[in-house]
Amino acid sequence: MNTVITTPRLGLVILKVAGRCNLDCTYCYEFNLADQTLAAGPRMMSDEVFSSTIERMRRHADKSGQRSISLSFHGGEPCLVGAARFDRWCEEARASLPDLQVFISVQTNGTLINRDWIDVFLRHGVDVGISLDGPPEVHDHFRIRRSGGGSYKAVRRGIDMLQANGVRYGILAVVQLGADPLKIHRHFLDIGCRSISYLLPDMTHDTIGDARTRFGPTPCADYLIPIFEDWWNNSTLEVRIRNFWEVSRVILGGASHVDALGNIPLGFVVVNPSGEVEGLDVLKACEDGLTRTGLNVLNDDFADLIHASPLHSRMVFDGAPLPTDCVGCVEMDTCAGGYHPHRYSKERGFDNRSVWCADLLKIFAHLRRRLDVDPGETVRLRRELAGAR
């Protein structure tokens, strides 16, 4: 008799291994927006919490029947833990999860990368995400050191080391409203970046007002569409801009692979240095305490989220409800409301369309014209792909 699997898969566990950062980025949702949980907790994750997290991953995989899982190191700044400890933790993860294929990544500001880190990244096949917002005059305006001054030179030194040693890396860049998008994008290409993700600023319906006044009704679309045109007309396929790949994917009938589109189950949890388990950590941009679940890896399994926090359980394992205002929209099954924190208001919670709704619709319309796929064709393609599966 076949065993029925009732525990949902968990594709990713994000470890906030450092509760501090050597930078003081003005828009950081961990330290400079609505919630101060990380700053109020331990400076670093202990070995006990790390080992407990790995054990919870093993237990969850046993119950869900999955054969692979991703482990991503975040912060604060994860490189503050030191290359030797990171190396030891990677070895422990693989040794303690022998029946799972374990994919390891790190999201870093890049300023602390040195020869020791390069060796560890290569030894464990680590994928590296680097936060870089543009050339020095753009990057250094927002991503500043706690001691004062910009961080661009240190980040570039880290990127140059990654490139010289063949370490896989990608760039995460926050959309700089009102800036010259092509100047920024071409800077990334000029320094050799071939994988770029542009992040929409983390604003809510309670905080968007000033941006609308200063930058107009569709500043993100006005930033991204010129980049798309440059990419479409001039770049080879080796340059991967994740935003455009993912919008194109859902337009062509595929499933979204990112949490900002498609209203898909997030499929990940976050573990803080204290061991506290969170759902979507970016909700810290919305309201203080919104990410807390009451769970801790020292005592609780990840599946306990189902009973401990209906809000996070829906987001992580089921997918959040479609916002009321999105019902009937031509992109209700593709955009599907946009990124969760961008839907938030204190008055209505997450039952709002994204603050970037007009931008998303403009971007979708532009890519549909380029791909020559209207909403009706997307529906047909989805049906065909579902039938093929």
Image (spheres, helix red, strand yellow):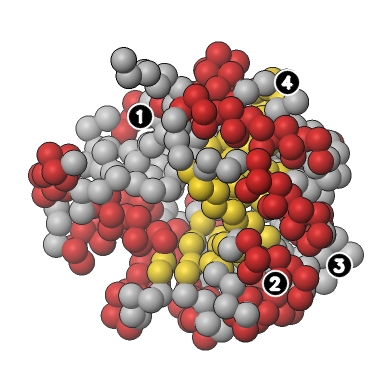
Q: Earlier in the sequence, mark 2 or mark 4?
A: 2
**Where residue 118 is drawn, which disc sits there?**
2
- The residue that mark 4 highlights is 299
Question: Within the image, what quadrant is residue 231 found in?
Answer: bottom left
Can residue 341 be spotted in the picture?
Answer: no
> CA separation, marks 3 and 2?
27 Å
Q: Are marks 1 and 2 in contact (CB under 8 Å)?
A: no
Q: Earlier in the sequence, mark 3 or mark 4?
A: 3
Query: Up-down: is 163 above or below 201?
Result: below
Where disc 3 sits, the SS reads: loop
- The residue that mark 1 highlights is 322
> CA separation, marks 4 and 1?
33 Å
Where disc 2 sits, the SS reads: helix
Give the residue at x 45% y 43%: 259
Comparing marks 3 and 2, which lies closer to the viewer?
2
Q: Earlier in the sequence, mark 1 or mark 3?
A: 3
> CA separation, marks 3 and 4?
40 Å
Identify residue type, mark 1: Leu
Q: Earlier in the sequence, mark 1 or mark 2?
A: 2
Q: Residues within 10 Å of mark 4 (few under 14, many from 20)?
A: few
Give the residue at x 63% y 69%: 122
Identify residue type, mark 4: Asn
Query: Up-down: is 18 above or below 37?
Result: below
> CA separation, marks 1 and 3?
43 Å
Q: Are marks 3 and 2 in contact (CB under 8 Å)?
A: no
Give the residue at x 15% y 57%: 373
Q: Earlier in the sequence, mark 4 or mark 1?
A: 4
Q: State the image coordinates of residue 260 (x, y, percent, origin top left).
A: 44, 45
